[in-house]
Image (cartoon, rainbow, N blue to C red):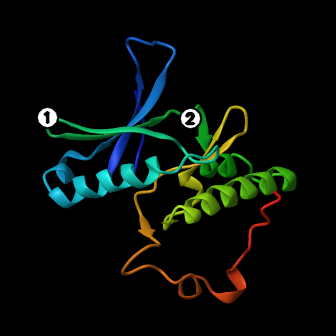
């Protein structure tokens, strides 16, 4: 079944026929974009970057493949909702303790990504998933920048001084 859609594609829930207890989310590049090689390259690059990131607060990528004219990214299925949906369902806002837990989990995931040379450039509530056990996971690394090599982003240019945070590694 269709789980949702974004700028580059649609996400579907899939069940492994050989292992029926295993469910996956499959992001499929929109067909109108699939005919443009650069979009398939972007999805492939997203898969390569996110697959390098093995962290409890980052959605795990399992595979990337092309079938006929469909470009597909296979990732862990997160049974829950987006942070955007959780916020919308709370007219008075999230409880402070819950909001802090969510923010710390997001910061841990971003710190891990940064340590592996990946800067997520589209962090927003719609790209944060919270499962039924309240575990937070960041997804959609489609808009990222590599921190290595030519064209790397200088963090001092990317963030204003007041916005720079140093994540306490003891958290």
Q: Where, by quadrant of the figure, is residue 31 drawn? A: top left
Is residue 167 shown left or right of residue 62? Answer: right
Q: Label 1, on which residue?
A: 68
Return the x and y of residue 55 as percentages of the image width and height: 61, 47
Q: Is residue 63 or residue 136 the one in the foreground?
A: 63
Image quarter in which the C terminus is found: bottom right
Residue 93 position within the rendered picture, expressed as x and y whole percent measured from the top left: 77, 55
Please tell me the numbered disc located at residue 78. Answer: 2
Residue 115 left/right relative to 167: left
Q: Residue furthest front?
A: 149
C-alpha distance separating marks 2 and 1: 27 Å
Residues under numbered marks 2 and 1 in contact, where contact means CB atoms less than 8 Å apart:
no
Within 10 Å of disc 1 (Cα), the crowding (few <14, some 14-19, many 20+) is few
Q: Look at the picture and state if 86 lies above or below 37.
A: above
Which of the marked residues, 2 or 1, is nearer the chain's N terminus?
1
Q: Could you tell me which quadrant the N terminus lies in?
A: top left
Q: Secondary structure at mark 2?
A: loop
Q: Is residue 93 visible?
A: no
How dense is the environment of label 2, judged by Cα within 10 Å: few (below 14), some, or many (20 and up)? many
Q: Residue at x 74, y 73 (%)?
A: 166
Residue in the picture at 69% in, 80% down:
164
Query: Which percent across, then down, holds residue 139?
Result: 51, 50
Question: With respect to residue 60, does 114 lie above or below?
Answer: below
Under tag 1, what secondary structure?
A: loop
Q: Residue at x 23, y 52 (%)?
A: 40
Count all numbered tags in the image, as a single digit: 2
Residue pictured at 68% horizontal, 52% vertical: 87
Instruction: Locate residue 11, reporting x and y percent.
Output: 39, 39
Instruction: Give me the disc on residue 143.
Output: none
Q: Is residue 108 visible?
A: yes
């Amino acid at each position: 079944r269709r789980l949702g859609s974004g700028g580059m594609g649609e996400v579907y829930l899939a069940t492994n026929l050989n292992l029926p207890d295993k469910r996956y989310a499959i992001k499929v590049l929109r067909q109108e974009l699939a005919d443009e090689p650069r979009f398939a390259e972007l999805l492939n690059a997203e898969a390569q970057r996110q697959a390098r990131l093995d962290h409890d607060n980052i959605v795990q990528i399992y595979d990337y493949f092309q079938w006929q004219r469909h470009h597909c990214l296979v990732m862990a299925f997160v049974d829950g909702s987006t942070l955007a949906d959780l916020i919308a369902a709370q007219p008075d806002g999230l409880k402070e303790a819950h909001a802090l837990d969510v923010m710390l989990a997001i910061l841990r995931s971003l710190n891990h990504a940064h340590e592996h040379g990946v800067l997520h450039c589209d962090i927003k509530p719609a790209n944060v998933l919270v499962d039924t056990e309240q575990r937070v996971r960041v997804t959609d690394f489609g808009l990222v920048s590599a921190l290595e090599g030519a064209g790397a982003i200088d963090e001092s240019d990317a963030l204003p001084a007041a916005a720079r945070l140093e994540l306490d590694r003891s958290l």
